[in-house]
Amino acid sequence: MNYDFFADKADKLEILEFIFKETDLYVYDLGSPYGQEIFQYTTVDEISSRFELERDEFGTTFQLWTPRHKGKPIFRKVDLDPKRCNGHTFRYATEGWGLIQLYFGGLKNNELKHSHIGHWNERGALKWEDTNNANGPVSSWDWTEIQATSRKLKYHIHNKLATRKIGSFGVLSGADKLEKKGIILR
């Protein structure tokens, strides 16, 4: 499942509030900053104090998981070339077949990049299982639960928070106001 939408900072905070109060999802960094481990967030305040959710040039990226999904997230250490990474030698990545990605697009140069939720489906993961055996067996995940969780998240964003659509992309109220002020939605 993949779903794209436009969200400003207030919209993103509403989505996070929903995740923390209305779901059992764990929220992890997709990738850690250089020299640090993956952080698990438990409140909206932790995220809003750590990230610039409005004017974030590269966007803000998370992996979502719950024990109901069965499989476990993998926190893989990534070795870095210190010559190319300001002296840093490692960072971590959060990986796993059944994780749900949440990417918040940022505002830059009068353009708001779209945000995204998505995840593998079982058939797609099975195609890559032999190539990427570090993620473990695809069969260890509960794909019915993953689909149900992502549908709940998409339903909330698309049917409760979005005020209109551009094609299949939901436009949340804050993003809609930005567009009316001249911000381009990309």
Image (tube, rainbow, N blue to C red):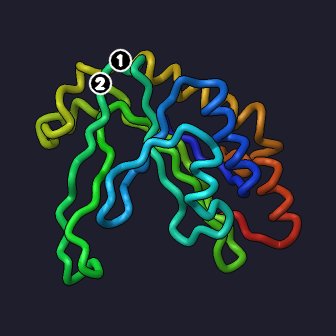
Numbered disc 2: secondary structure: loop
Q: Earlier in the sequence, mark 1 or mark 2?
A: 2
The residue that disc 1 covers is: 142
Q: Amino acid at mark 1?
A: Asp
Residue 152: mark:
none
| Left or right of residue 63: residue 116 | right
- Residue neighbourhood size for the residue with mark 2, other residues' Cα within 10 Å, grouped as few (<14), some (14–19), many (≥20): many
From what the image shows, is residue 124 above or below residue 172? above
Residue 72 appearing in the image: yes
Asked if labels 2 and 1 touch by Cβ distance under 8 angstroms, the answer is yes
Residue 71: mark:
2
Q: Amino acid at mark 2?
A: Gly
| Number of on-image labels | 2
At 73% from the left and 57% from the top, the residue drawn is 8
The residue nearer to you, when weighing 31 against 163, is: 31
Numbered disc 1: secondary structure: loop
The residue nearer to you, when weighing 46 against 85, is: 46
| Left or right of residue 114: residue 102 | left
CA separation, marks 1 and 2? 7 Å
The residue nearer to you, when weighing 123 against 51, is: 51
Residue 57, horizontal then vertical, whole percent: 56, 72
Residue 14, horizontal then vertical, whole percent: 73, 42
At 44% from the left and 42% from the top, the residue drawn is 40
Q: Quadrant of residue 133?
A: top left
At 52% from the left and 19% from the top, the residue drawn is 148
Q: Quadrant of residue 71?
A: top left
- Pick the quarter of the image with the C terminus: bottom right
